[in-house]
Structures are given as C-alpha cells and as structure tokens.
Image (cartoon, coloured by chain):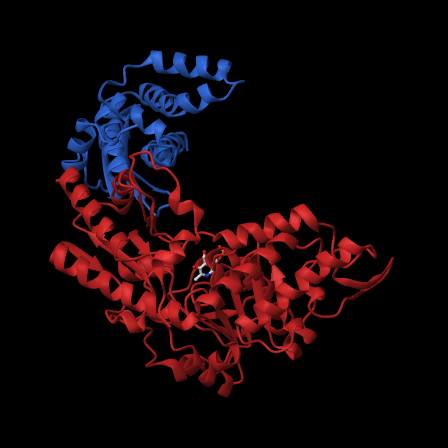
Amino acid sequence: MTLDVARVQKDFPILDRAMPGGGRLVYLDSAASSQKPQSVLDAMTRYYETTHANVHRGVYGIAEEATRLMEEARDKVGRFIGAGPSHEVIFAKNGTECLNLVANAWGRANLRSGDAVLLTEIEHHANLVPWLMLREQLGVELRYIPLGDDGHLDLSELDRLVDGVKLVAVTAMSNVLGTLTPVRLIADTAHAAGAVVVVDGAQYAPHLPTNVGDLGADFFAFTGHKLLGPTGIGVLWGKTELLEAMPPFLGGGEMIRDVRLDGFTPNELPWKFEAGTPPIAETVGLGAAVDYLEALGMDAVRAHEVELTGYALRTLAARFGPDMTIYGPTEPAERGGVISFAYKDIHPHDISQVLDQSGVCVRAGHHCAKPLMRRLGIGATARASFYVYNDESDVDALADALDATSAFFS
Amino acid sequence: MGLEDLYREIILDHYRSPRNRGELESPPAVRVEGYNPLCGDEIVVYLDVQDGVVADLKIGGQGCSISQSSASMMAAAVKGKTVPEARAVIRAFKAMMSIHEQRLDADGDDAAEKAAAEMAEVKLGDLEALQGVVRFPVRIKCATLSWNTLQQGLDEAGAAQAG
Ligand SMILES: Cc1ncc(COP(=O)(O)O)c(C=O)c1O
C-alpha cells in the first residue's frame, strides 16, 4: 500500500489557507505539532454539538454516550500501539505530563537517594527535566548513554552504564536528529539488569507502526497533537502490575473510590491516574486521528516518510553541498523525517524568518534539547520535518527559499 | 510587512562586521551572561566601569542577526558614556521595543506616553533601525537580550564599587 499524498492533502483544510505572499502554506514543522484532518475536526465538533456532558458521572443518556465515546477512544488508542487491556492506557494533558507522571508516581515510590537512572544525551527536556527534578529532590544519580558522531547512540559502554540502574528512560526517535534508537536492545539490556524501561514515543508513534510489547517498553508515552490529533491530550501506556503498584499522581475527583476526612482510596485503573474532568473532546479527536492513520496504514506512512526523507537528503546535498550541514544519521531507513541543518553562517532564526516569506514553516532553535545542542557544539538548528501531507514539492520549496535566504544575507 | 522592515541595511552591516566583539579580562571587568531560553542564543557582555564611566565594553557569544547587531550597536552607543547616561539609553531602547505593544493595548496610553518621554530623553541614532523589530513580536527578545545583560552588568559593577 502506498500513500496517495494528493488525496491526503485534500483532507487537511489548513493547507488551503491564504498566505500573505499569495503562495501556499508549506508546512514543515510537524515534529513540533502536526496539522489535523477534517475527520478529527468533525469528530470533535460533532461531539460538542450532539453529546457533551461530563463523563463517568451522569446517569442520563448523553452522559453515558460521552463516557462511551471516551472509552472507545481509549480502546482505539490502545490497539494502535499494540497495548493489552485498555485500562493500561491513561490519558493526560500531553506527553510531558505523562513522563512527569512516571517520574513522580513510579519514581517517588521506587527510588531512593543514590539510586541510578539511565537516560540518553539526546532526550527532549520532557524526558530529562522530570528526572533532573528527582535528582534534586531525592538525590538519584543520573547517567547518560552518549551520542556517537554518526548520529546514533553510542552503546559501547551500555553494559557498564546499565549496571545497577533502577530505571532506563529513552526516546524512540530524536526530535532533533531523527535518529531511531535501538529501543528493543536497550530494553532487553535494561531488563536483564532489573531496570524498568520508559520509552518516550512522542516522535515515534505518529510515524512508525508501534507495538509497545515488541519495543520492550514498560511505560510508553506520546502526545496527541503530533499524531494528527488535538492539543491537550497525551497518552501513557504502562504495564498493569507497575501501574497497580504505583501511588496516584494528581489528586481530586475521578481518581478516587472513596474519600473520608482522614484518607482516601484510589480508583481502579486507568482512572486512578486521571484526576479531574478529563479532556473528553480531545480523546474523541485522538480516536478519530488514530482511525485516520490506520486507514492510511502505518506501514504506508513510514514508507512515504523514508522516501521523502531520502529525496530531501539528496536534494539538499545536491543543491547546497558543503554550504549545508545536516545532523543525524545519513541513511533514511535509520531515521525519521526530521532534518536539522545548518546553512552557511546564517543563524537558524534568520533562516526561519526569511523562509516564512515564502510560506515555508520550519522550526529554529534548540528544540527543547539543550544538552544535545551542547553535545553538537551549536546553539540552535533550523529543522524541517515531514508528515503524511508533505511531498517532494515541499522539499523543493524549502530549497528555493533557502536560495533566497542566502541571497539576502550574503 | 516586508523583510526590509526587519533587516534594515545598517542592521545587516553590524551583523556582518560587529563592533566591539571580544573579551576583557575579568576581573577587573565585569562579565555577565544573558540567555534567550526560547532559541538558545547566548550573549556575554564584558564591562569595564571606571569612575562612573563605561570605559570599555566588549561583546561575546552567539546569536541571530538581530541579537548580534543590537549588541554591536549597543556597545557603540554606550561606550564612553557615564553610567546614568548608559542607563538612560537602555531605558530609551527598551521603551522603543515596547511601544508597539502598548499602542495595541487600549489601556496603554499612560505607558505609551511614558515610553515616548523616555525615548525623547536620548537620541538613539542608528539604534532606531531596530524599530521595525516590534512588528515581529517573537524577535523582540532577540533585540533586547544584550540590553538586559548590560543592565545586569551595570548593576553588578555598581554593587562591586559600593562594596
Ligand atoms: C521527543 C519528545 N518528547 C516529548 C515531547 C513533549 O510533548 P508535549 O509538548 O506534547 O508534551 C516532545 C514534543 O514537544 C518531543 O519531541
């Protein structure tokens, strides 16, 4: 099955919007947040127009309907990542909150001063700062798998690093370099050392067929808005026995079975971790996003992105040669559709600003991965990233706009 | 709203050949770092204050054309000035960077007048080329980074002398 990109593009209304220069929107920032197909927008609107009520509370019809829609979305999302029972799928407000949930609920219950946690040098701040906070608060020791010069993690010291650690938290795909990490290998090594494995799937789940069991994860976190879904919804999958043994994270309504003046009994999974009124419409929207991606086929999505990334790497190399540095692995099959680059001596901010004149949207900055930037010896990169609605003409538009940038600053 | 409003010729000139780049030995000079957490730009201001005068000032670090040219023009504008004069230039520049936002704000008339008064106090000269930045709100922080860093440097230099 191959992706019919021209048809996919018709499903994304934003691609038709008018642009100040009269051109079209060339959206190359899906690694920051993806656009939404009409079906997602419709599902959310329909929910508000016909069904909205608070969930898990009302006995009346539409409240039951709203509850059913939300729980159906949970089932769909679980199937999408190859999860077992749906109670292992927890909704939170974004990927960041999911990782904070693990660090706080699992971390505080299981980590003591001096315990070691293993991360990597390429983590997003979302999978870094929660652990740094535990370092400050509990005195846990943090270790890091280094980045090799080939854009891959350097696993040569993995056995030594993993020795004695209680938890390993690793991204499945770098949001800066596009690097696909050997999650399974790291997970197997970690398990052999008795550690729990947390996988940050924020960049992975939207772009590759995902099976949490095959990855060897104990926890897997991702975020709806990068996966054609709405903002305000994140997903944490975790193994039942781990989730059962953890204390709750946030306290409030929904997450309790009983409350007395001198204590409380937490609810059962998954609601134990869903304090307060959940983002109901957002779960419905995420369910529709998952439906949309499954109809395309995640194998086809991945194949399209490998092909487009290959085209981009070839095109940029041919047109800009030594004037451009592209970070990360050189083989499209070993990376996602995320291309961070430096061009001449032009600062990424200035590149992004001039590209904007041509309707080309790329991200400039440290991409919430400052330790990685330091490791690369740079302050910032410009980053173009692809999704199902991008095609070769977008890459060509990027290259043309880069020519204009060069003309402007030389 | 074209790019020419942002990237005026004089800005590009300061970006291509920045003035007062380098380091001063510290101490005696004060060394202050400024970060733009949004984009990762870093600036280092070396400040040598003697007898209440900014005797010398050097700029290090890395950043985009706006932050670098702003720092370069800033160095040229405050070098040789007394500390109160330098502070007046900082106020005037920051007022220029805020004036557009205040005009958009219906309740901002008093603030806008105050900003205009602060700007009238000093001649900004070349620095006025940076006025176009206010139409690109995300870039305002690029333009003000070196100024906030300088302000901190003046505070530290003052404290060092008092102590
Ligand atoms: C690798 C990675 N992890 C985590 C996140 C956090 O996602 P969110 O900002 O939705 O919380 C992001 C995106 O910003 C990411 O790229």
Which image quadrant for residue A287?
Answer: bottom right
Q: Nearer the viewer, residue A74 or B30?
A: A74
> Residue A389: in sight, yes or no?
no
Establish if A295 lies above or below A10: below
Judged left or right of residue A404, residue A116 is right
Q: Colour of chain A?
A: red
| Residue in the picture at 47% in, 53% down | A37
Please identify the quadrant where the N terminus of chain A is shown. Answer: bottom left
Establish if A306 lies above or below A8: below
Tell me which chain appears blue.
B
Judged left or right of residue A104, residue A367 is left
> Residue B115: in sight, yes or no?
yes
Residue at the bottom extreme of this rendering: A192
| Residue in the picture at 43% in, 60% down | A124
Give how far across and how far down residue A371 sits, in percent.
Answer: 37, 59
Which image quadrant for residue A330?
Answer: bottom left
Please identify the quadrant where the C terminus of chain A is shown. Answer: top left
Judged left or right of residue A133, residue B142 is left
| Residue in the picture at 63% in, 66% down | A74
Give how far across and how far down residue A213 sits, in percent.
Answer: 52, 80
Which image quadrant for residue A304?
Answer: bottom left
Q: Nearer the viewer, residue A121 or A89?
A: A89
Establish if A281 lies above or below A84: above
| Residue in the picture at 22% in, 52% down | A396
Q: Which of A3 and A57 is in front in this view?
A: A3
Give how far across and how far down residue A314 sits, in percent.
Answer: 18, 63
Judged left or right of residue A271, residue A286 is left
